[in-house]
Image (cartoon, helix red, strand yellow):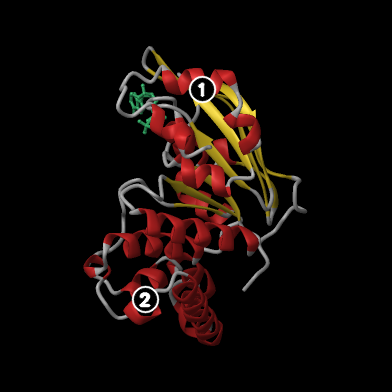
Amino acid sequence: MSTPILPARNAPILQVQELVMRFGGLTAVDHVSFEAAAGDITAVIGPNGAGKTTVFNLITGFYTPSAGEILLHGRDGRRALHTTPGHRIAQAGVARTFQNIRLFPGMTVLENLLVAQHNRLQAATGFGIAAVLGLGRYRAAEREAVERAKHWLEATRLMDRADDAAGSLPYGAQRRLEIARAMCTDPVLLCLDEPAAGLNPREAEELAQLIRLIRDSGCSILLIEHDMGVVMRISDHIVVLDHGKKIADGTPAQIRADEKVIAAYLGEGDEDETPAPMEGAA
Ligand SMILES: Nc1ncnc2c1ncn2[C@@H]1O[C@H](COP(=O)(O)OP(=O)(O)OP(=O)(O)O)[C@@H](O)[C@H]1O
């Protein structure tokens, strides 16, 4: 497996500069700047509607920003993600999971992991006659794809379900499979969109361990998460958005004590829900 840390640990792997996203008259992301360091878990948090998902969609190429820059310092040096077409973002080294699980439910667990590597296999084969002439190269790439799938099946404890249909897995296992699938593209930056949503406390703790393991393997992580217990336990760095603007940026200890952050969460409106986010932070 290739070593994903590039650049050196703690140097920025992602730089978001003065990012703006307007939907008609609404400014969902308003001049947001932050950096994610290589080898870190960076969390983006904030109350509902703060702009977190929009920032993710901009970084992962689902949207083109109205203004601003997103720079990735990946294996091929500096890459401007804000001008990279969505279908090229994975190639640049960015993988993501979704709030709503998006697996191929009728395919087996293993097939889901192999399909994720389709682009790499295709690149090894070439097209037409090159595919035939390049058969040896293809076989080597295929073996590597199977090894990579096995590695992530083990890491996500899904090896014993490898031949089962993805749709038949329990919810928590499907979440882990989504992460395994993203890791099979060998990213330098993994973007996780609410990975703990719908998990029970035991599953959330297992997920936290898995995310730490991925970070320790050298892949940098960007995380949107509502479960403040998970965020505060595993994040190296937290960026807080509110109404599209960045209101804080720091370590978990700094964020927990930040008055603007506490005020933003207390002002969230739903009194049943508001105390919960910072409770987990204690
Ligand atoms: N495609 C879109 N078209 C119009 N408005 C949008 C679109 N996507 C997001 N918005 C608006 O942008 C704002 C930010 O939404 P976003 O989903 O990024 O927030 P969020 O912080 O991820 O919220 P949540 O925690 O509820 O998922 C909201 O007011 C939302 O209604």
Q: Residue at x 35, y 47 (%)?
A: 197
Depth-wise, is mark 2 or mark 1 nearer the camera? 1
Disc 2, SS:
helix
Residue with the most extreme top position: 25
Q: How many marks?
A: 2
Q: Position of residue 72 (x, y in %)?
A: 64, 44
Q: Residue at x 65, y 70 (%)?
A: 2
Disc 1, SS:
helix
In the picture, the disc for residue 262 is 1
Ligand 1 within 8 Å of disc 2? The answer is no
Q: Position of residue 208 (x, y in %)?
A: 49, 56
State the residue in front, 163 or 159: 159
Q: Position of residue 263 (x, y in %)?
A: 49, 17
Q: Quadrant of residue 255?
A: top right
Compared with residue 136, is residue 131 higher up or lower down, i.e. above or below? Answer: above
Q: Which residue matches tag 2?
A: 110
Q: Residue at x 43, y 68 (%)?
A: 118
In the picture, the disc for residue 182 is none
Q: Earlier in the sequence, mark 2 or mark 1?
A: 2
